Amino acid sequence: MKENQYDLVAPFYDALAKLIFGEKLLKAQMHYLGEMKSSDRVLIVGGGTGRILKHPAFLHVKCIDYVELSAKMILEARENAGNLETVRFLEIDFFQHHGEYDFIICNFFLDCFNEHFLSMAIRKLAGLLSQNGTLLVTDFKPSSNRKNKLLVSLMIIFFSLTTRLQAPKLQDIPQALRALFSPVQRASFNNGLVFSSLLKPNP
């Protein structure tokens, strides 16, 4: 099995997330989707089962590329997309993808990587984003809360066994993003365990 391969968990991924977090993770992912413009070329990276595609904002954008490594996740995402005609599903390694986008959505994707590949992923995102584009990142962040720390440790163990998760621990994603991006809006969820941030490229 390749690293970060989510085929095995795809059929029950949403049910597991709902069992642990309710709808809070989905709420965080959708928090800033209304910021997309009708002229935007949109990239969704590591979109998983694609529940966010049900958000009405996607009906009004120019086009959507949905990049996901897991074939079974793409099957789930196609169902969730319904009759959305502007989306193109691409079963490809994100690092091999090319293009230019005005709005990039990166939800619970960067937490898959170790420190080295996290830095590579952020540089890749910067290369895919248009000059005045917007990056939306929703993910977990390190927390001093004991309950949150235990939950993150258990998630890493579970996904290491089921997906060959590359990350040995949760990286400080907001800090890593600052190398190339500046946050313009940010919201916290789940007692600080989850953040959602709109970012612009550093000048």
Image (tube, grey):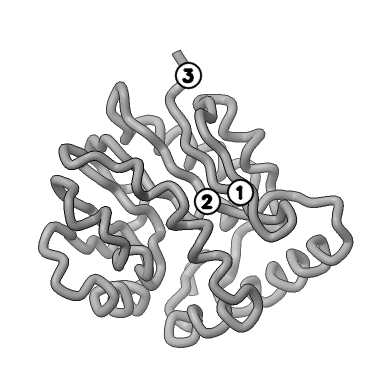
As drawn, which residue projects farthest toward the left? 85
Q: Position of residue 173 (x, y in %)?
A: 63, 42
Q: Are marks 1 and 2 in contact (CB under 8 Å)?
A: yes
Q: Earlier along the polypeptide chain: callout 3 or callout 1?
A: 1
Q: Which residue is mark 2?
A: 138
Q: Earlier along the polypeptide chain: callout 1 or callout 2?
A: 2
> Is residue 35 left or right of 136 when viewed as pictured?
left
Point out which mark residue 195 bears: 1
**Which residue type carries mark 3?**
Asn
Q: Residue visible at 25% across and 37% down?
A: 101
Q: Secondary structure at mark 2?
A: strand
Q: Earlier along the polypeptide chain: callout 2 or callout 3?
A: 2
Q: Position of residue 87 (x, y in %)?
A: 18, 59
Q: Residue visible at 35% across and 56% down?
A: 93
**Which residue type carries mark 1?**
Phe
Q: Secondary structure at mark 1?
A: strand
* 101, 121: nearer the viewer: 101
Mark-to-mark CA distance, 3 and 1: 20 Å
Q: Position of residue 151 (x, y in %)?
A: 76, 69
Q: Which residue is mark 3?
A: 202
Query: In the image, is residue 108 above or below residue 154?
Result: above
**Which residue type carries mark 2?**
Thr
Q: Are marks 3 and 1 in contact (CB under 8 Å)?
A: no
Point out which mark residue 151 bears: none
